[in-house]
Image: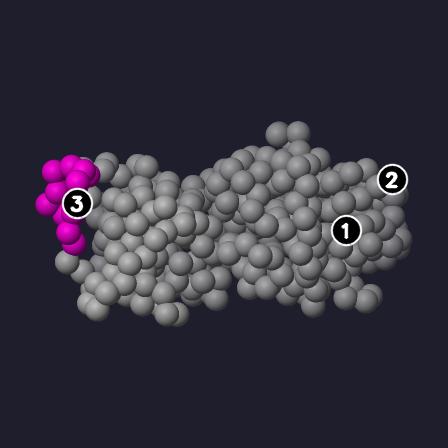
Amino acid sequence: MRAGIISLGSVSSQMVADKLQQYFDHVDMINLKEIEVILGKEAGVYYQGELLRHYDTIYVKGSFRYAQLLRSITSMLEKKVPYLPLPADSFTVVHNKLLTHLALQQHNIPMPQTYVSPNIAEAKYLLKRVNYPIVMKFPHGTQGKGVMFADSESSAASVLDALGALNQPFIIQEYIESGGTDVRVIVVGDRAIAAMRRRAMTNEKRANIHAGGSGEMVELTDKISTLAVQTARALKADICGVDILEGPRGAMVIEANISPGLQGISKVVPVDIADTIARHMYDKAAAKVKPKSVLKELDLDEISGDKELMTNLKIRADQIVLPPVAKRISGFRETDDVKIKLNKNKISIERL
């Protein structure tokens, strides 16, 4: 089986790619900047000038600046690749904060009171009716960029004047007091697998790690887990970071990220997030790939009795890595207890 990651080559992408090597026969890192999408007679997704080869699963990810390209790629691949963790719609919705909040509204997911105005004049009228402080956001942006705070009508009006000069759309949102913290939850499939409480720097309201915030592990409660999974489902994302504020009125979702950074949270939680993502991608892809295709590749008629494979031995960090097909046939998992018999030139492994 083959897996690919189309990305900008981030550390997080490489972390997942390294783990995919343990499950798939072949894994490729594909540079998003070298991708072309052609519509019409020669329609397809092209990489370095050649039609993209077949993969059983592809994790397509990138920043909001590439939202249209990401949607185009996944739209073209949806009927060709057995499993995509992120469908085309997710790139349009999640890379736009307004569309994200509309999706949350449609699924009755709690969020801060949010306002949208058609122009600066109407927005200034709105400023007379809201409670301060407030948050003002651009629809696009990640890592806390494009988020502004105003503690009075006059300061908010000044920000609006600047936004008017930039001719930028914006969102006005109530400020939820949470002690300068929020909770980043990582959702994979239908499970919330890890959470980190992010704490803003002194005199800084944004708790994002990229904005200088710090992180610490937080235990996932049933309420937070359920809210995060509901959010990911509403956004149609199988891999998703969900940001939650815990305020006086309970937990509220403020944002989602379908290209979440893994470095910071991986340092503070005991879960191997990259491995969980890789295993999820393998399980989903394997479920959609007919078993007979694996047997045909190996010249096997059925999975029964002893089988012999001729392959190279892979050793990583003094650990023997079984070929993916060996794990499929034997059913071995990392959590299994096994009995190992050692002899010169021979190793025998048996599940207890």
Q: Would residue 294 be found to the left or right of residue 68 on screen?
A: left
Report the span colored magenta: 296-309
Residue 226: quarter of image: top right
Other residues around mark 2 within 10 Å, as few (<14) / some (14–19) / many (≥20): few
Query: Is tag 1's residue or tag 3's residue first in the polypeptide sequence?
Result: 1
Under mark 2, the amino acid is Arg
Under mark 1, the amino acid is Val
Under mark 3, the amino acid is Asp
Whole-percent x, y for residue 214 in the image: 70, 64
Query: Is tag 3's residue or tag 2's residue first in the polypeptide sequence?
Result: 2
Q: Mark 1 points at which residue?
A: 135
Q: Would residue 263 be found to the left or right of residue 210 on screen?
A: left
- SS at circle 2: loop
Name the magenta segment's main secondary structure.
loop
Q: In the rendered view, would you say 308 is above or below 32?
A: above
Q: Which residue is drawn at 32% across and 60% down?
A: 321
Q: How far separated are the C-alphas under marks 1 and 2?
A: 14 Å
Residue 314: quarter of image: bottom left
Residues at discs 1 and 2 in contact (Cβ within 8 Å): no
Q: Mark 3 points at which residue?
A: 306
Looking at the rendered structure, which numbered label has been put on residue 33? none
Q: How far separated are the C-alphas under marks 3 and 2?
A: 75 Å
- SS at circle 3: loop
Nearest the viewer among 202 and 298 is 298
Q: Mark 2 points at which residue?
A: 129
Residue 158: quarter of image: bottom right
Whole-percent x, y for residue 302 in the image: 16, 37
Query: Is tag 1's residue or tag 2's residue first in the polypeptide sequence?
Result: 2
